[in-house]
Image (cartoon, helix red, strand yellow):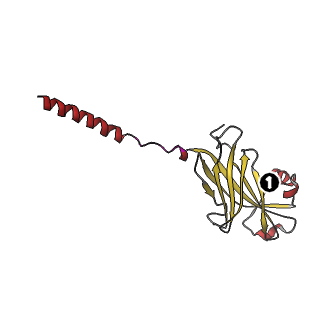
Amino acid sequence: MRHALFFTLMGWWLAGLVALRAEEPLQDRGKDVIGTVSVMVYHSTDGDPGAVGKHSQEVGKDLAERLRRDPHLKFKHYRMLGGDKKPLFRSYENWAQPFGGSDQLMVRFESQSKMTKEGTRLDLELWLARKKILKTDVAITPSRPVYVLGPVWRGGRLIISVGLAPGANPGS
C-alpha cells in the first residue's frame, strides 16, 4: 500500500514536471520588433539628371528643398534610385538593401537605445561593394532622417537617407 501511494505521488510529480517542460519556451526578447527603419538612396547632381537611367524617379519638391538647405547636399537635381524598409529589432542587427537585393550598397543597423516617441539611437554602417565605408552612431526619428553624402556616381553623388518609417514606431 505504501509503495502504491509512493509511486502514485511520484507519477503525479513527474507528470507535473513534464507539463512544465511542455510550456512555451522562453521568448528571445532581442527579436522583438521596436520599429521600422527606412533606407532611401538618391542621386544628386548639378549636371544632367538623365545620366542615372530611366528607372530613377524625381523626388518631391519638399524633399528637394530640405536637401538644398544643407550646403553639403545642395545640388540642382535629385533622383530617387531605390529604397528598403526593414524591422528594427530590440538587440539584433539587420541589413537593408535599397537596390533590390543587390549587395553593391547595403546598410547595417542595430538599436543602441530604447525606442521613445522622439526616436532612437542606432549603430549604423554603410557598405559599398562589400566594403565598410562608414561606421557611426546616429539619432533618428520619423520626421528627421539622417542623410549621408555618399560616393561619386554617374556624374553626381549618392545620398543615403536612414530614418524611422512614419507610423511604424511602437514607442509612440
Q: Nearer the viewer, residue 166 or 124?
A: 124
The magenta segment is: 24-29
Residue 34 lies, with reference to residue 96, above or below; the image says: above
- Secondary structure beneath dot 1 equals loop
Q: Nearer the viewer, residue 80 or 128?
A: 128
* Percent position of residue 98, x then y: 67, 60
Q: Residues within 10 Å of mark 1 (few under 14, many from 20)?
A: few
* Percent position of residue 51, x then y: 80, 71
Q: State which quadrant residue 105 falls in.
A: bottom right
**Residue 87 seen by the camera:** yes
Residue at 13% in and 28% down: 2
Q: Main secondary structure of the magenta part?
A: loop
Q: Which residue is mark 1?
A: 60
Residue at 67% in and 69% down: 129
Q: Quadrant of the C terminus?
A: top right
- 31 sits to left or right of 81: left
Residue at 45% in and 42% down: 26
Look at label 1 and name its amino acid: Gly
Residue 20 lies, with reference to residue 55, above or below; the image says: above
Q: Nearer the viewer, residue 102 or 60?
A: 102
* Percent position of residue 29, x then y: 53, 43
Q: State which quadrant residue 59 falls in.
A: bottom right
Q: Is residue 42 magenta?
A: no
Question: How many discs mark residues in the rendered view?
Answer: 1
**Residue 165 seen by the camera:** no
Q: Quadrant of the N terminus?
A: top left
